[in-house]
Amino acid sequence: MKHASRTLLGLALLCAAAIAQAAPNCTIKLDANDQMQFDKNTATVSAACPTITVQLTHTGKLPVAVMGHNVVISKTADMTEVTTAAAKAGVAAGYVPQGDAKVIAATKLIGGGESTTTKFPGSKLKPGEDYSFFCAVPGHWTVMKGKLVVTK
Ligand code: CO
């Protein structure tokens, strides 16, 4: 009897592990701070996600005009072009070039204590392609950047 329940428990754990593995990750959760840092340098999502949520939390205290952050996603190869366009777009546009097809997703610009969310379809990503997430504020993206790994 003891043996049987242990086997059942083992099976239940195996099933739970299988389910956890099968469920694709559809959220990119990033914290940013007053030291001009994200809390991660890599994130993973699945292109199969109907909707991918980008969740940015600014855990610092400095106002948006001093230490504003956003999250922009593009192909890594497009980063230089997108950050140049972001600088031109300026603070009024939240350092996001409007209507730029190279921008896959972008949050608004936020200051300390704020958080923001944006959503985009996983179909905008291709598994295996080289993507990056970064803060497009001039001077920030050289350090505030990471690799976005896209699975099937
Ligand atoms: Co920033």
Image (spheres, rainbow, N blue to C red):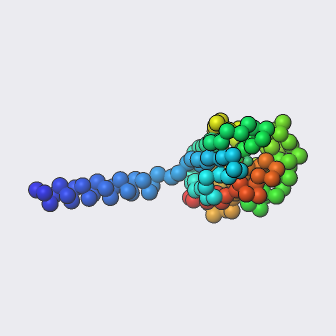
Instruction: Indicate whether 152 appears above or below 121.
Output: below
x and y percentages locating residue 46 in the rendered image = 57, 54
Instruction: Indicate whether 81 appears above or below 108.
Output: below
* Number of numbered discs visible in the structure rendering: 0
Q: Quadrant of residue 75?
A: bottom right
Q: Where's the C terminus, which quadrant?
A: bottom right
For image coordinates 26% across by 59% down, the residue present is 10
Give left or right: position of 29 versus 8.
right
Residue 110 visible: no
Residue 88 visible: yes
* Residue farthest left in this picture: 1
x and y percentages locating residue 40 in the rendered image = 61, 55
For image coordinates 84% across by 36% down, the residue present is 92
Instruction: Decide which of 88, 123 is in the foreground and name it.
Output: 88
For image coordinates 51% across by 52% down, the residue present is 24
Instruction: Decide which of 118, 15 is in the foreground and name it.
Output: 118
Give left or right: position of 68 versus 115.
right
Give left or right: position of 48 versus 20.
right
For image coordinates 82% across by 58% down, the residue present is 80
Instruction: Decide which of 24, 96 is in the foreground and name it.
Output: 96
Q: Where's the N terminus, which quadrant?
A: bottom left
